[in-house]
């Protein structure tokens, strides 16, 4: 997901930055996404703060490797 709104969460989210999403069906059912933010921890944020993009598998693997 790419952050498109960070008002109120400027220290936790950067507009234009790609964020990792942790699957959480319960949060999604309430309009939230579980996002690994700038703290390195995952928190629930309103889904309208983000835009979904399709990341090619080779890039996804490279990004996940550097995040570990």
Image: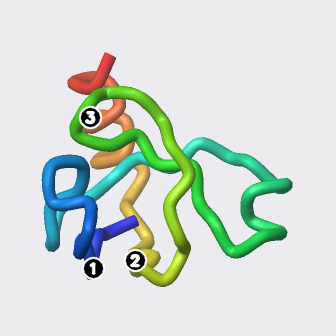
**Residue at x 15%, y 72% (from the top left corner):** 16
The answer to whether the residue labelled 2 contacts the one labelled 1, judged by CB atoms less than 8 Å apart, is yes
Circle 2 SS class:
helix
In the figure, is residue 32 to the left or right of 35? right
From mark 2 to mark 1, how far is it between C-alphas? 5 Å
The answer to whether the residue labelled 2 contacts the one labelled 3, judged by CB atoms less than 8 Å apart, is no
How busy is the neighbourhood of tag 1: few (under 14 within 10 Å), some, or many (20 plus)? Answer: some
The residue tagged 1 is 5
Q: Is residue 5 above or below residue 10?
A: below
In the figure, is residue 58 to the left or right of 12? right
Mark 2 or 3, which is nearer the eye? 2
Quarter the N terminus occupies? bottom left
Q: Which mark is residue 22?
A: none
Please provide percent x and percent y for residue 14: 15, 61
**Residue at x 40%, y 28% (from the top left corner):** 41
Of 12 and 21, nearer the camera is 12
The residue tagged 2 is 49
**Residue at x 23%, y 75% (from the top left corner):** 7
Question: Which of disc 1 and disc 3 is earlier in sequence?
Answer: 1
Quarter the C terminus occupies? top left
Please provide percent x and percent y for residue 65: 30, 23
Circle 1 SS class:
loop
């Amino acid at each position: 997901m790419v952050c498109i709104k960070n008002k109120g969460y400027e220290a936790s989210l950067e507009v234009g930055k790609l964020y990792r999403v942790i699957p959480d069906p319960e949060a999604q059912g309430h309009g939230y996404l579980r996002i690994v933010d700038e703290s390195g921890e995952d928190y629930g944020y309103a889904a309208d703060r983000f835009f979904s993009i399709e990341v090619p598998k080779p890039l996804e693997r490279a990004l996940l490797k550097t995040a570990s």
